[in-house]
Image (cartoon, rainbow, N blue to C red):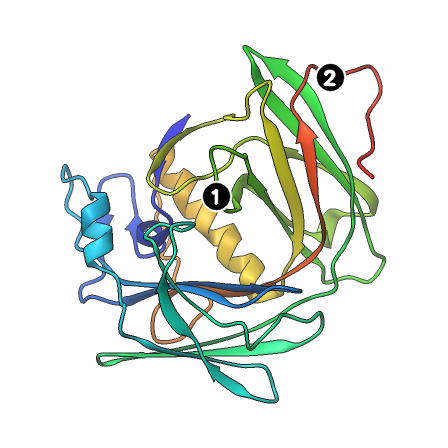
């Protein structure tokens, strides 16, 4: 199963079995997040027209950047204007950020973006993190690994989870892990989730794409309901198109006035595992 993953562009589109339907007018596309202990990161671009049979290039994406936007974040006490800067960690390599705000568990953060005639807003909260208990290689097929992660869902309901992964030497940042977000509607205590692939921008991704001999960094993120629904609907849209299913999903995200997302992530710790042939017993990561 292969798919060209375009995070910024995919969030714009309504997908169906016959055609890709871009927005009738350009819209501002937002990728933004804040993690406990980290600073806000926001990537901005304008939506690009999509035509069947025409490839969207890296240069197209760079030309769509909204470099001169005014981006502010309010943490409940102060409003801070984020600084736009070149950052090769990301693609396109331009982000808005600030060291004046650091994410805290339980706090809410409001985002406001002004660019041309666009005004985009969003609000998110950083939920209480949940520890990642276990990470191990469950099986190997043709040097490709299937990884399992275990964690214990707290008894209170309303928890939502998403796994992020990165491979040193391949990734300079964490990316979404495919098919790895869930809520606690069917969880009871300790649960395990499969990790199949790291979804990378502008890359053809196979399922799985985790290779023997590599290192894999994993983090379990808690997120609020609106953020969870964004990622859930994103993957419905993504794989509906992959399998040519006969329906479309217009994934507008959890921001108002634009497309995309503004998400608070609660993270307890990051875990590194060497991808090796599985042993008879699972190894807990301390």
- Image x and y of residue 83, in percent: 40, 73
Q: Earlier in the sequence, mark 1 or mark 2?
A: 1
| Residue 113: percent from left, percent from top | 37, 78
Q: Quadrant of residue 135?
A: top right
Residue 21 seen in the current view: no
In the visual, does 181 lie left or right of 65? right
Q: Nearer the viewer, residue 172 or 57?
A: 172
Q: Residue at x 49, y 32 (%)?
A: 169
Q: Secondary structure at mark 1?
A: loop
Residue 158 seen in the figure: yes
In the image, is residue 165 above or below residue 234? above
Disc 2, SS: loop
Q: Quadrant of the N terminus?
A: top left
Q: Is residue 283 left or right of residue 135?
A: right
Closer to the eye: label 1 or 2: 1
Measuring 30% from the left and 52% from the top, which residue is drawn there? 9
Across and down, in percent, residue 165 comes to 57, 41
What residue is drawn where x is 50% and y is 26%? 209
Q: Which residue is mark 2?
A: 278
**Observer-nearest of 127 and 230:** 127
Quickly name the residue at label 1. 172
- Residue at 69% x, 14% y is 277
- Please provide percent x and percent y for residue 103: 63, 70
Q: Pointer 2: residues within 10 angstroms few (<14), some, or many (20+)? A: some
């Amino acid at each position: 199963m292969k798919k060209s993953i375009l995070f910024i562009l995919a969030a714009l589109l309504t997908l169906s079995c016959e055609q890709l339907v871009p927005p009738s007018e350009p819209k501002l596309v937002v990728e933004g997040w804040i993690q406990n202990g980290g600073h806000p990161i926001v990537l901005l671009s304008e939506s690009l027209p999509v035509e069947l049979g025409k490839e969207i290039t890296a240069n197209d994406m760079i030309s769509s950047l909204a470099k001169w936007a005014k981006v502010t974040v309010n943490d409940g006490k102060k409003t801070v204007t984020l600084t736009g800067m070149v950052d090769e960690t990301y693609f396109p390599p331009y982000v808005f950020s600030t060291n004046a705000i650091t994410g805290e568990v339980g706090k809410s953060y409001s985002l406001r973006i002004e660019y041309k005639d666009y005004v985009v807003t969003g609000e998110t909260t950083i939920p209480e993190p949940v520890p990642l208990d276990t990470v191990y290689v469950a099986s190997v097929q043709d040097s490709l690994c299937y990884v399992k992660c275990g964690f214990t869902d707290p008894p209170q309901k309303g928890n939502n989870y998403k796994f992020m992964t990165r491979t040193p030497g391949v990734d300079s940042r964490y990316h979404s892990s495919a098919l790895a977000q869930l809520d606690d509607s069917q969880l009871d205590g300790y649960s395990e989730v499969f990790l199949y692939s790291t979804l990378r921008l502008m890359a053809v991704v196979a399922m799985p794409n985790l290779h023997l001999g590599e290192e894999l960094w994993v983090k379990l993120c808690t997120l609020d309901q609106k953020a969870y629904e964004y990622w859930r609907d994103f993957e419905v849209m993504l794989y509906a198109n992959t399998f040519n299913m006969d329906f479309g999903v217009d994934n507008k995200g959890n921001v108002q006035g634009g497309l995309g997302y503004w998400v608070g992530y609660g993270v307890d710790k990051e875990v590194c595992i060497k991808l090796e042939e599985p042993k008879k017993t699972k190894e807990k990561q301390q």
